[in-house]
Image: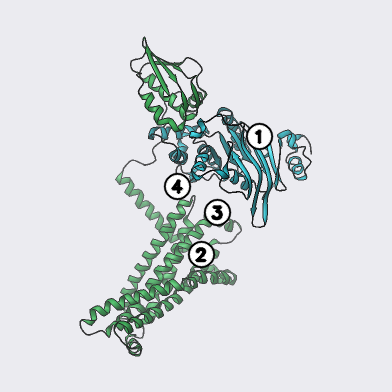
Amino acid sequence: MYVESATQDGVLQVQLHGHWRGTAVRAIEAELAALPLESAREVQVRAQGVESMDLAGGWLLRELAQRATAAGAALRYVDAMPEPLRLVAKTLGESDEPSIAPAVDEEFRPVSALGRRVVDRWRGFVAGIAFIGEVTLSVLRAFTRPRAWRPASIARHVYDTGITAVPIVALIAFLISVIIAYMGAQQLLKFGADIFVVDLVTVGVLRELGVLLTAIIVAGRSGSAFAAEIGAMRLNEEVDALKATGVDPIEVLVIPRALGLIIALPLLTVISDAVGLAGGALLCRWLLEMPFIQYFQRMDEAIGDMTFWVGIIKAPVFALLIAISGVYRGMQVRGSSRELGRLTTVAVVQSIFLVILADALFAVVFMELDI
Amino acid sequence: MPAATDAPPPAVLIEVRGLVNRFGSQVVHDGVEMAVNEGEVFGIVGGSGSGKSVLLRTILGLQRPQAGEVRLYGRDLTQLSAAELRQMKARYGVTFQAGALFSSLTVQQNVQLPMLEHLELPPQALDELALLKVRLVGLPVEAAAKYPAQLSGGMIKRAALARALALDPQLLFLDEPTSGLDPISAAAFDDLLLGLQRELKLTVVMITHDLDTIFRTCNRVGVIVDRKMITDSVPAIASNPHPWIQAYFHGTRAARFLGTS
């Protein structure tokens, strides 16, 4: 029992008891709601029985006072007004000003929302172009100053993005070529054309899958790492510190990463191709009982002049796309760690999208060129 | 906070005895003794790397000491079960040096988080109590809907204080509450703190380097030197013969408070 009440001649006598604290808000609120305020013309409150009261208790008493006023009853404290109530009243003010903060979410306005999106997208597009321009300028400037190339930094990024990625890239290449050989063998066996499994694996891995899968894995590993590293440096004002030191952040942060990845991705692709072809050979040996010598002879016939180069030529382009979207999103981080997470996700999704888009363009170009 | 309904709390709210903290071979604390009485403002002072933050983390129960005991409200933290420790954490409020506001939540949601965790409140009470705390620390109502990234340094300190006060604790820990503020904002924060301390009958423990804050707000000061703590009242501590304390209170920066140099 927190509240005790009795009515006498239209005067509601209220006695308060116990601990009026945040933990008891629900119980106290229920008891206060049961008070017959409407039938009273005056409410007399005695707070002497209260053992302790915090601000939540004070807030409840303020609510009571407001309800009494609304019901047309005068409320007064017979003994002293509790301190917390005084503080709550002083803080919130006596007036019934809007005590709820303005709503965060905006009204639903489809047209202006669409317009805002279009403008945002356009600005984002322009900013992206501007960033590419800045990077190009920095690269051009770097040609005049050999010191700007920073071989140690490039080597570190080759190691981080390339050498440490070898196990996962090799494993994925192996598994994918096994899957392709297996699926192909099941279909081709029906026609007794199982020797063409070799063509399928060889051309598929060398032209498309080797480089594409490697690029996707690297986008997930290194694109996200670029965005997160540079984003964290931005939050820590390290990028501003670089600028203030007179160092071009693009020169020390962007170029080494982009160059490192441009070196690492083709090398990873070669490994991926080799492991993929080996995986195909193993599966043909086990599943089709094709001797290795026959597999490699057939492979040799299947590989045209350009088959390998058509795949590998795409790697540096993919590397550039991944590096640029990673560092660009990282550079956009400002304000909070939430932005960092969001932009890292954007970087990965965008770089994978760009890689696949570029791959499609390559396919069209190669088809037109008949290679 | 059911424990709050027990017998009246003891006059000594925090008691630290023979505290030892070690990281590998590096000894940070070696027999720290500290007692904070109810209703006082206690300042913790020490050089960089003297283990002020480690001491605070130990008192908060975020870190177990190698030896010694820490008593909050008369209960030894190392003896508490996980559930009791959780309850204990509802009885104090903390602000961290950089605010440590949750960046994905608005100020109002930041204040509501401890309430949601420890209290069962109806939605309206939750909103209004959070706004009450926001107003209490002198922030405008509009600030409640903002994210921490949109706030200035002084507002972040105040919002952190509002979150620390969310559960109406009697005990408040502040880690460098005025660091990074301009002198005027820092003085305003000191005044705010003193006002709240008086009105809410708070006991405050603060780590600070700010001499203005020490002389303005603290009743007693504990100085961490040589891995131990020397405690005294504010006027008396300045005459302690220890060289670090002499340098601290009688350096050029302190001269204007004591009229010495």
Query: Tag 4's secondary structure?
Result: loop
Q: Which residue is mark 1?
A: B218
Q: Of discs 4 and 3, which sits in the foreground?
A: 4
Secondary structure under the numbered disc 1 in the rendered image = loop
Neighbor class of circle 3 (other Cα within 10 Å; few <14, some 14-19, many 20+) is few
User: Which chain did the renderer colour green?
Assistant: A
- Residue B82 at x, y percent in the picture: 50, 45
Q: Position of residue B25 (x, y in %)?
A: 67, 57
Q: Amino acid at mark 3?
A: Asn
Q: Please identify, in this view, whether the residue under mark 1 or under mark 3 is nearer the observer.
A: 1
Chain letter, colour cyan: B
* Chain of the residue on which disc 2 is drawn: A
Residues indicated by labels 4 and 3 sit on the same polypeptide chain: no
Residue under label 3: A236
Badge nearest the viewer, 1 or 4: 1
User: Quick check: A257 left or right of A126?
Assistant: right
* Residue drawn 62% across the image and 35% down it: B187
* Type of amino acid under label 2: Val
Question: Is residue A245 positioned above or below A57 on the image?
Answer: below
Is label 3 in a helix, a strand or a loop? loop
* Outermost residue toward the left in this view: A191
Quote the CA–CA distance across marks 1 and 2: 50 Å
Q: Which mark is residue A254?
A: 2
Secondary element at image label 2? helix
- The amino acid beneath tag 4 is Ser
